[in-house]
Every structure is written in C-alpha cells, then in structure tokens.
Image (cartoon, coloured by chain):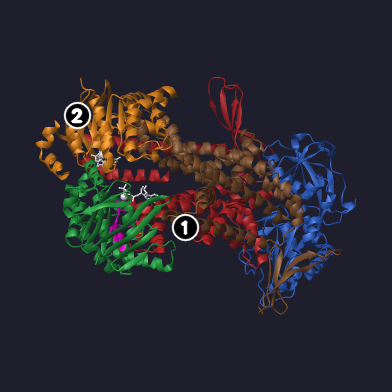
Chain colours: A red, B brown, C blue, D orange, E green
Amino acid sequence: MWKRLESRFHFFAMATVTTTPSASTPAPKSQAQLILERNRRARRNFTLSVVASWIAMLLLLLFLFSGLKLKSSAAGTQIAITKWVETTGNKQKQDETLFSLPVGIPSGEFAYSTITLDWGFVGKNFAFIRDGIWQTIGISALSIVTATVLALLAALGRLSTFPPVYALSTFYVSLIRGTPLFLQVIFFFLALPQLGIDLSGLWAGVIALGLNYGAYMSEIFRAGLLSVGKGQREAALALGMTQSQMMLRIVIPQALRFAVPPTGNEFIAMLKDSALVSATGFVHEILWRAGAAGKPVNRNLEALMIAAVFYWFMTISFSALQDRLEKYMARGDR
Amino acid sequence: MWKRLESRFHFFAMATVTTTPSASTPAPKSQAQLILERNRRARRNFTLSVVASWIAMLLLLLFLFSGLKLKSSAAGTQIAITKWVETTGNKQKQDETLFSLPVGIPSGEFAYSTITLDWGFVGKNFAFIRDGIWQTIGISALSIVTATVLALLAALGRLSTFPPVYALSTFYVSLIRGTPLFLQVIFFFLALPQLGIDLSGLWAGVIALGLNYGAYMSEIFRAGLLSVGKGQREAALALGMTQSQMMLRIVIPQALRFAVPPTGNEFIAMLKDSALVSATGFVHEILWRAGAAGKPVNRNLEALMIAAVFYWFMTISFSALQDRLEKYMARGDR
Amino acid sequence: GGGATEAPKDLLGQIMARGTLVVSTDPNYAPQSVAKPDGKRTEGTKCASDQLTAGELEGFDVDVALELGKRLGVETCFVTPGWDLITAGSWADKWDISVGSMTITTGRQQVLHFTSPYYYTPAQFAAAADSGIASLDDIANQPVCVGVATTYESYLNKKFDDLGLPESSIYAQPPEGVTVIPLTSDQDCAQSIGAGRTDFQVYLTSGTVVDQNIASGVPVVKVGSPVYSEDLSVAIDKSHSLDPTSLVSKLDEAVKAMHTDGTLAKLSNQWFGIDLTQAPNK
Amino acid sequence: MPIVKVSNLDKYFGRLHVLKNISLEVAEREVVVIIGRSGSGKSTLLRCINFLEEPDNGMIEVDGISVPATHRKTREHNQQVHDLRLKTGMVFQEFNLFPHLNVIENIIEAPVTVKKMSKEQASEIGMRFLEKVGLAAKRSEFPARLSGGQKQRVAIARALAMEPRVMLFDEPTSALDPELIGEVLNVMKQLAKEGMTMAIVTHEMSFAREVADRVIYMDEGCIIEQGEPEKIFAAPADPRTKQFLERIR
Amino acid sequence: MPIVKVSNLDKYFGRLHVLKNISLEVAEREVVVIIGRSGSGKSTLLRCINFLEEPDNGMIEVDGISVPATHRKTREHNQQVHDLRLKTGMVFQEFNLFPHLNVIENIIEAPVTVKKMSKEQASEIGMRFLEKVGLAAKRSEFPARLSGGQKQRVAIARALAMEPRVMLFDEPTSALDPELIGEVLNVMKQLAKEGMTMAIVTHEMSFAREVADRVIYMDEGCIIEQGEPEKIFAAPADPRTKQFLERIR
Ligand SMILES: Nc1ncnc2c1ncn2[C@@H]1O[C@H](COP(=O)(O)OP(=O)(O)OP(=O)(O)O)[C@@H](O)[C@H]1O
Ligand SMILES: Nc1ncnc2c1ncn2[C@@H]1O[C@H](COP(=O)(O)OP(=O)(O)OP(=O)(O)O)[C@@H](O)[C@H]1O
Ligand SMILES: [Mg+2]
Ligand SMILES: [Mg+2]
C-alpha cells in the first residue's frame, strides 16, 4: 500500500517540476505532453480515490466504536443520532439526542446502536499501556535477530550433505514447529533450570521466541536459498570460490533479499506473539499492561483497543521501514 | 525431511527389483552397473545416517525428560544412573540406583539430573487430552478454509484497478495484521453482540482466526499471483479470455501451487493458534483440555507435554499430506 | 534468582542476605492487587530491574505482602507470572512466595507449603440483573460460568476432595443439574454478561469480585448468601532448591501476629469495606 | 479490402515514444514479415494489434471490427477488444503454454471457456490442429516434457484451435535451439501455403525471403521501408535497412 | 605437452550414460570448437573439465594438475579441484553475473575473496580486462541495466581477471539477440589471437570456421570425429556429422 502510494507521490513531485516551464511558456501542448498528462491524471485519481476510501473506512470504524445510536423518531420521518450519557447528579444514564436528520418519508421503526467505550478509562490508562511499546519492540527485535540466525543455520543445514547436520536441522524444525510456543516459553523458563540452565524471564522468552520463529523462518530462508539459481553457484565455484565463500558472498546476499518480505510478515506477527513472554512475570509489554489495566475494572475491550492502536501503529511504521529495505536491496534490479 | 526420505525409500524399492536379476545371473557386472550401485549405496548411507541421527536425538530428548540422574559414585570411578522414587509406606522419596557404569579413571564428583515428570498423571489424562484432536483439527480446518477464501479475495483486491476494492483490501490486511489475534477473538465474542451480531464461541473463533490468517496469507497469495508470469496472462487474454476467466482458469491454479508450501506453514501455526478459540469457553480443543487436566492438580508441564506430542504428531502427518499435495500439483513439472 | 555472595543455608537466609522478598501476585484482581496506571518505581529500591516495586501496585494482597516484608526486615518486590504457573508449583527459584489470595486446596498442598490463612472469602453466586434469577433454587439446571481450574469449578463439579476445605467452611450444597462453563478467568464471566452475551446468566466467584463487578458498573446482582468460604493463604514452593521450612514458619508467625494486632482487619476494612479476616463458623 | 488495418497508431511507455503514427494494412491471405533492430517497436506493434498493449492514439481494425484507442476502459471498449481478440491468434517467443495443463487441455481451454464449446467437440477440433502440427501422439504430455520446438508447435495449434482470421507471430523461433527451428518454420510455411493471413516478427531472414509476401523494416518506432522480400533484401532503399541487414549477416 | 588432458572420462546421470569413455587433449594456445546435437553431452564434457560435474570415471589434467574421478570427496580431492578451477575460466550461456554486485564488483569478487588480493589491486586488474572487452565506461552499472551482449562481455572479463590458463565457453552467444552476437564473438576472436587456450561449444558455424584450430563433433556422448574446420565443414567423414551440419544450415 504505502510503497505504491509513495512511488505515486514521488511521481507527483517530479511532475510538478517538469510542468512548470510549460506553464511559463503557454505554447500549445504536443500530443506527447497531452498523453503524458492524461496518464498522470489517471494515476493521481486512483491514488486520491484510494486515500478517500481509506479515510471513509477509518471513519466507519470510529463510528462503530462511537457509542452513538441511530434511532428513527417522529413517526419514522427522522433519524436521530443519540449518545448514552450520564446525567449529572445521579448515576443513571440516558440517551441524549445529538442531532436528527429528517428523512421525509416514514422509514419504519428502527434503532441501530454501536459499541460504547469508556473513554474515561482510555484517557487514564493510555500512557500506562503505551509505556510497554519499548518492551514489545525490544523483545521482538532481540527475538527476530535470534530467529534469523537460527533460521539461516537451519536452512543451510537442510542443504548439508553431512547426515548429523541435516538430521539436526530437520529435527529442530519439526520439533519446534510441532509444539506450541507457549509450552516452549514455559519450558525455557521453568523446566530448563532442572537441567542446570537458569534463564531470566526475558531471556527465556527471547530464546523461546527466537527458536520458534527460527523454525518457521527456516522454511522461508530455504526457499530463498533455493531461489538463487544454480547458475549463480556454478559461476562462483568456477571462479574458484569454496563452498562457504560461495554461500557467504553470492548465495546468502541474494537469498536474504528474497526473504525480506516474508520475514517482515513474521516480524509483524512476532510483535504480537511477544506478549506470551509476559507469562513469565518479568516482562511487562503492551498486552500485559492492557490486561493489568483492563481486567480488574472490566474494561478489557477498551484496554485491548488501546493496545491495538499501538500495535497497528508499530506495524505500519515497520512496514514502511521494510519497504525502504526492499528498495535498497532491489538496487541491482533497476 | 519426509519428502526427501520418502523419495529415497521409493528408490530402494526400485533398486531391489532391478538388482534381483543380476543376482540370479552372476555375470561380471558392467562398469555402468558398478557406478550405479556405488551412487545408490552412497544415497542409502546418507538416509540411514539421517534416520540414526534422528533416533539418537529422540532418545536424548526422552532422556532429558526421564527423571534419571547421572551421579559419580565410588570415588568418581563409577557413573550411577539413579531414579527418584517413592519408597513404599511413607511418602518420602529417595534416589534408587538403576545401574552403574564403571568408568575406571576417577572423573571427579559430579551429578547431572534431568527433568522429572509425573507419569501417573500422563497415563490418566492421555485419552482426555487426545479427544481434543478433532476439535483442534476441526477449528483449524474451518478457519483455514475461511482464511484461504479471504486471502484470495484480498490478494485479488490488491491487484484491482477499482479504488474502493484496492483500498478495502489494503485496509483489511493492514488493520488485521496490525492488531493481536487475541483482541480479534475477544472482539468477535464480546463486542459484536453490541452491534447486534451474536456469534457462538466456535464461530466467533473461526471467523476471527480466518480473518487473521487471511490477512497474513493474502501476502503469500499475492506473491503467488505475481509469480505467474506476464506471459501466462497475455496468452490467456490473446486467446480471448476475459479477466476473470484468465484469473480462475490460468492464474489462480498456478498461484495456488506456488502458495502451497507457505500455506502449509500457516496451517501448522494455526493448529496451535486455534487454542485461542478456547478463551471463549465453548470449545474444548487440545490445549484447553491440557489446561483443564493439568491446572487443578498442578501438572501443567506434563499436560502441555502430552498436548505437544499430539501437536507434533498432527504436524508431521499434515506435512506428509502437504508433500503429497505438492507432488500432485507439480505433476506438470516432470 | 539469587544474588547472595556467600551461599546461604536456606531460603530465609537467602532472602535476608539479598535484602528483598520476591512475591508473585496476579495483578488482575481488584481490589486484591492492581497495577497502578500512574505508578512510579520506588526510589532507591533494591528490587531487580525486571521486578515491580511497591510504588507500582496497590491492593489488599499488595499491602499484606509489603507488611510481611517489613516484618522480615527486607524490601518486598513483585513479579507477575501467569496464575497457572504460580499455582502449579515448581517455580524454579524464580520467586520466593506467593501472596495472591490463593485458596488452600488438596492439590496445591502437594506442591506448595501454606501458612495459616490471612483472610477468608465467601464464594458467591451472581446473575445478570435482568435474568430474574433471585435465589439459589433458580440456579438449578442453568449454565454457570466459572474461572477454569478454580475452586469454584471444583465446587460445582462436587469435587470436595480437590477443594480440601473443612466441613465447617461449606454452607450450602451445589445446585443440581448445572452446566459448568469454565472461562479463562473469573473476570471473563462478568465481562461476557456485561457485553450482552446470553450464553449464561449466572456465575460463581469470590464475593469480593462480585462487589467489584457491581461497583464497576456490570449489571449483575448477588444471588443468595455465600455458599462456602475459602481459606486464603501465603504459598511457598516445596521444590525450592533451598530449604524453605524456616521461611514458612517465620511467615506463619508473622501472619498470626498480623491477625492478633489487628493489622489484617484494618487492611480488610480499608480495601473491602468489611472484615474478612475472621475464620468462618457456620 | 484489407483484413487488418492499423491507422495512425501512437504508443508511449512513460515518456518513451515507442510507436510513432504507424499506419499499416494487411490483405487477406497475405504474409507480412516485420524486421528491425531490437527495441525498434516490432513487438509493441504486434501487441497493439490485439490490444495486449493499449495504444495511446489511433485505430485498429481486424476483419470489420474497428476499435479506436481510448484511455477509458468502458464496458463497450472491453467488448470490442474481446471480439477483436477472437479474430486474432498470437504466438509468443516464450511459448507461454499453460504448465498446469497437458497438451490437449492447453488446446481446448479457450474453445471451452471462451466459446462455450463442449469438451468433446473442442477435443475433436484440437486433435485436428494437433495432427496438423504433427504432435497428435503427445496429446496427454505436460508441456515441461516437450522440447522447445514441440512446445511452440503446440502453441501454434492452440492459437489455431480458436479459428482466428489472422495469426500474429512474435519471434516464434528465437528461444529455440538451432536444430529445432526448422520444425516450427515448416509448420508456419504450411500455414502460409493454406492461405492464413499472418504477421510475423522474426530474425530468420531466409525464412522471410521464402514465405513473405511483404517485408517491413522498422526503426525507432517508424516503418522505414517495405516491399517484396527480393527488393528489400537485395536492394534496400534506406541506409538503415542496409546497415541492419549487414549486421545480422 | 597438452595443457588440457581428458582421459577415459565417463559420466552418468542416474542410468543415463552421458559421456562414454571420452579422451581429449588440448594443446597450449589451441582453440577447440565442440559441435553436436542437443543432448549429445557437449556441456557435460566442458563442465567435467572444471569439475562442475563430478565425473564417474577417468581423469582430468589441466596445466599439470591432474585430478582422478572419485566418489569420495576427501579434503585432498576438494583441494585439487580448487587448484584446477583456478587454472580454468568458464563462460556460461546465461552469463550468470552476480545481480547484487555492479560490474567492477562482479569482476573483483573472486580475485579478492579467492586470491586474497587487495581491492585496489584487483580493481586495477579488473579495469584492464574491462577495457579489453570495451566496457570500461560501465564499471559502476548493475548487470540488470546491461544488454545481453554487454553482460556476456563482463562475464568474459570476470573470468579473465582470475588469469586462467584455459577458457571454457558453453554456448556463449545462444542467449543473445542476433545483433548482439557479433560483439561477443569479436572479443573471443581477439582472445584467440592473443594466444589464449580455449574450448568452445557453439552453434555459430562461421565463427568456428574462422577461429577454430580444431573442430570436434560429438554425438550421444562420444567424439565421432575431429579435425581442421575446413575438413569437417567441407567433407565430414561420418554421415551423422554430415546430417547435423545440413540440419543446422
Ligand atoms: N512494458 C514496457 N514498459 C516500458 N518500456 C517498454 C515496455 N515494453 C517495451 N518497452 C520499450 O519499448 C521499446 C520497444 O520495445 P519492443 O519490445 O516493441 O521492441 P522490439 O522491436 O520487439 O525489440 P526485440 O527485437 O528486442 O524484441 C523498447 O525501447 C523497450 O525497452
Ligand atoms: N543435471 C542433469 N541431470 C540429469 N540429466 C542431465 C543433467 N544434465 C544434463 N543431463 C542430460 O545429459 C545429456 C547431455 O546433456 P548436455 O547438456 O551435456 O548436452 P549438450 O550437448 O550440451 O546439449 P545442448 O546443446 O542442448 O546444450 C542430455 O540428455 C541431458 O538431458
Ligand atoms: Mg520483441
Ligand atoms: Mg549444452
């Protein structure tokens, strides 16, 4: 989405520069110019329509959570938009009409109510939940680095001709993909100490997450490694490179590029799975904070929505970063 | 793993048949036969070594959970393997030596203990947890179908030139990938009733899972659709197909094939995420049962391990199925 | 984890040497323990950076834990693992004790040491205000929501052995023919009703939770009087690598002292509005 | 009356003017060979004729169906383009067989989905054309198991099975091993002999000399010269044509 | 003394016997062109010479380093293969430039990583060969922006920068547009003139005639006949050679 729009906006910038001279010299436009402008206009219209649609959908979403109510009134010839407000003094609540639209024709009796949120709660807990962002990002970043290293090793192991390495890599992927992440977190936190390995809550979580995502990502990386054509390997070998030089200098750099978009997908998923690490009790990221804020006062939905806004924000920012990275890696494609 | 081994075993079967005649006619073997046999032997050795390594790793895993203890004894010249058993009568436990290995040289004092599980609990609750398999598979299957349909629609929407469709598809993917699955399940379960949509626990879960995975998978499908070369589309159009005929008959069948391996990855992940649906209280799949069995008697780890065994089993079975599907879809590649 | 320089002989020694008592608590129960949205880390704290301090939590359990720390002469630090992990024992030395309104049950006694109870809560049925359910008799043959693996679930399933309560604590027999609906936590029951779901109308939980539900605006009412009373106590892991016995007896003494000098009663009145620290007698 | 008529065709890729006011007529049963340097716009011209590229200006007419260039894809325009495509068959350099379908499925796909023919009827027609290209025996093979020359012959049969009025060939032998070129050119010669109207982009000069009724030389988006093959190859009027023919041997 | 010596080479792909007891010697400064039908084993022979394919039997010797076929990849064998590859340079049909590196980086990659040359020194040598193939101006371009002919010339420069004793070319012009073939063949002619030992698989018969010291015709994994180009092209002794040369025009 952003990539596409961005390149469009980039295009506008160029266009503005180049059309300026033709404005100062009001010579009749050539056929080429007319056609160019027509095509440009069509593209801009598309972008604007997309942006408008997004805004409309965001507004719809906001409306669904506005707590407003649509009601027919005055014998169905009006639609009233009402709000459920606390009348001062007593704790009773009642509908207060904000405004009403005359629809003219009687549209029958109906009432449509939307989801009411406790905005007071939101205001009070917003900052508390927000402060979990850095924990979430920190765990995810540490874990994705661990996962990337493990995934690369596992993917290389899958290509190994040395049986124990091949077996280890397939065993790892199978075992970890085959069992729930939650169990893995618990295992690293509470069972490993019995084997003499004592990890803090954070590190138990990071290692469990890294191992887990590493197993899933190894399949991505394997596909990436396989996507680098045989010709590339042969060219490297024919030049006298060793297997490991070939891998490090020729294959992996190209495979990584192929692997960036799906790895981005995984990182976005990990932002949310990092919440499982909270179960250890030593990490207080966004979702833990949402639970701690919302559950005791029965404002779960509100708390989760605040968390969701942060997650969405992080996801969008990260996607933008990812686009940049993809563009950088595609520099050989121009 | 299985794919590779399987093709190997297939190869053995062939080999047996073809080598039989040469055994009955003990004519001197040709160079071709010798070379063929040598290559075949090398491949078989690889397979056997891999299988042996797997078995070794499984045994190591079992040992780690055996509750056995390695202890040096007799001034460090022996290693004793001991077990922590309940001595009858009183509830006291103590180490009972199973057998000891003489190592000859004094190896210093050491003790290495492994993780002790309550096997009585395992025996008693195995069947109860197992009965959740069908629920898990059922939810996952329903959800993956929902997700596939949504992902395909979203991926097609991304390629649309009609702005609202393009915007809807990007908005859906962004919003859903941007927010936690847990919130989505809760939203469908707790918030939708306020909008007048009342879903049962199962359906709230299935729809939330389907929507969530659909958003992630749409990126996979989009890559799949893009992987079908421009040439294929042009050939279809040049033959007079409409856009939708081209998509349905030419592009999607090829894109699906490209999408099978990563979709398999998603399904495997979903087997475990389906546990979130239990949060609604009306679905009793494996992980819920593990919790229900383990929590009251404080055998969480044991219960989770049982669940893990089933998940692993399901994952391996599913991977085998997936391999078959991939082979079937690759039939045009031979 | 530990932090002592010279190896202490037992858990109490380790706590004294470390100067901190690491307490696990579930911060999802108001008014027992709640994270303060505007909480600040206590200045000059000895707590590790991934532990919470007195300034970041509040509630009855929190105050009891702080008081216990004070009486041991050390600072109290808090960690917040999942409730399942706390009740299951095998804490791998990650924290010292639990002060989390934990009911003493038969199962838990196998893996945890308990001090004598520091307070008692009544188990209370509640129903949606508009459901028309007004007495215990109305509950028969209804679906009833509870938190999964709670004493309430055991009670409804008539598993009194699991409950392990003295005869005198049980005031009423469970209603007949109910369908038990176990949700992830007690709070989810009230939340479902509050959201307008109609899968069930009744739930069973602690009276303090019901009070809090009503106070936070969930449209529910109490049904009948409490059906039994739970003994809630401080728990210590039996499988700790250091001997916990001296800690258990020290804490037990402290709890008893807090009963006699009125500290607990004062805290109970402060947080619940009534005194829940007197042992029940039918 | 010409069966293909291209009038005042312009095509831009971004700022690049690829086809410059091209006009061209092809008579029924005529074989036109288009030659020219790489990037001169030969493929683009061919692809504009069946609207695989949308022209920016001008008009295309095939067998009475005339479609003006437009930037608004109205329903009517799409319908016209669809009708026009039914009149033309196209063969690509890279074959573009459908890899998930076997040979006969490749051939009957369009008759069945586009013309709503029954499978039996389509198979019958398909087999007729498969025999014509000499590949009846390969009917159940998947494309991946065919040689390049066989693939291209199947692609020709697939296009013919829609019974088009005009066949467009875009370098049909450029992706083939030298040995396999012959078999494809033979099929094309046969087609020409049977009176199919064809427009062919190719680098096979001896083939052009043998089959073409007219050779067109393009450079930088313009038709520089055209005429009978003897004339073009023996005595090109334009120096650019001459230079091109020399370079290509 | 020959610089390349292939003795009794056998190669199987599964059950397929692709090279059948091939022996071949190439003298220093000799240019050998290998021709033959598709699938006759030409590429496999070339690829066995630098062990891109492991032969199943026989022995390869290049510039004094002789490596016997083995199925055990011992450390010693790997070392020998490595040394042998340093003596040979290879140019592929599909160029196989490294797409993530620009032109000069492509060229200095191997000298730097394999020969541990400094970047400056490698760049200097690289530029010398880049000038030789006439592409000094493109030093910072990425491969995707080069034409096919330019790519192949960079690939030649890249192989030359390792200063091999023998150059192997596997259909270096088959993936090129007819117009671009010339520029690559010219570079190769130049190399031959300067005395590089070369083994070339190609379908460009006129080039073979002009440059080759010896032409080898292969069929079904065997060398059927060899000799001076005049002899082979004018009067092939074997009927298979004759038939092949006719088919390819
Ligand atoms: N889709 C496209 N987008 C942008 N530019 C294009 C596109 N297709 C072709 N071009 C450019 O248009 C010009 C003409 O291309 P065209 O493919 O028609 O040439 P051609 O004569 O067929 O060449 P060749 O012999 O290489 O096939 C070239 O400069 C090419 O780079
Ligand atoms: N990796 C491989 N696995 C199996 N068979 C192969 C492999 N490579 C080549 N072959 C087979 O070996 C035979 C010889 O192939 P090779 O590529 O050496 O022929 P060629 O003479 O170079 O043909 P071309 O002119 O098409 O390049 C062919 O039948 C081919 O199908
Ligand atoms: Mg072209
Ligand atoms: Mg070859």
Marker disc for residue B38: 1
Task: Please tell me whether residue E105 belongs to the stretch shown in magenta.
Answer: yes
**Corner quadrant of residue E249:** top left
Task: Please tell me whether residue D73 belongs to the stretch shown in magenta.
Answer: no
Q: Measured along the vertical axis of the image, is residue C237 above or below residue D142? A: below
Secondary structure of residue under mark 1? helix
* Residue at the disc numbered 2: D23
Confirm whether residue A127 shows in the render. no
Q: Position of residue C85 (x, y in %)?
A: 70, 57
Q: Which residues are magenta?
A: E89-108
- What amino acid is found at the position of numbered circle 1 in the picture? Arg
Q: Going 43% across and 64% down the picture, which residue do you hit?
A: E73
How far apart are the alpha carbons under marks 2 and 1? Answer: 67 Å
Q: Is mark 1 within 8 Å of ligand 2?
A: no
Q: Nearer the viewer, mark 2 or mark 1?
A: 1
**Side of E10 relative to A85 (left or right):** left
- What amino acid is found at the position of numbered circle 2 in the picture? Ser
Marks 2 & 1 on one chain: no
Q: Position of residue E58 (x, y in %)?
A: 36, 61
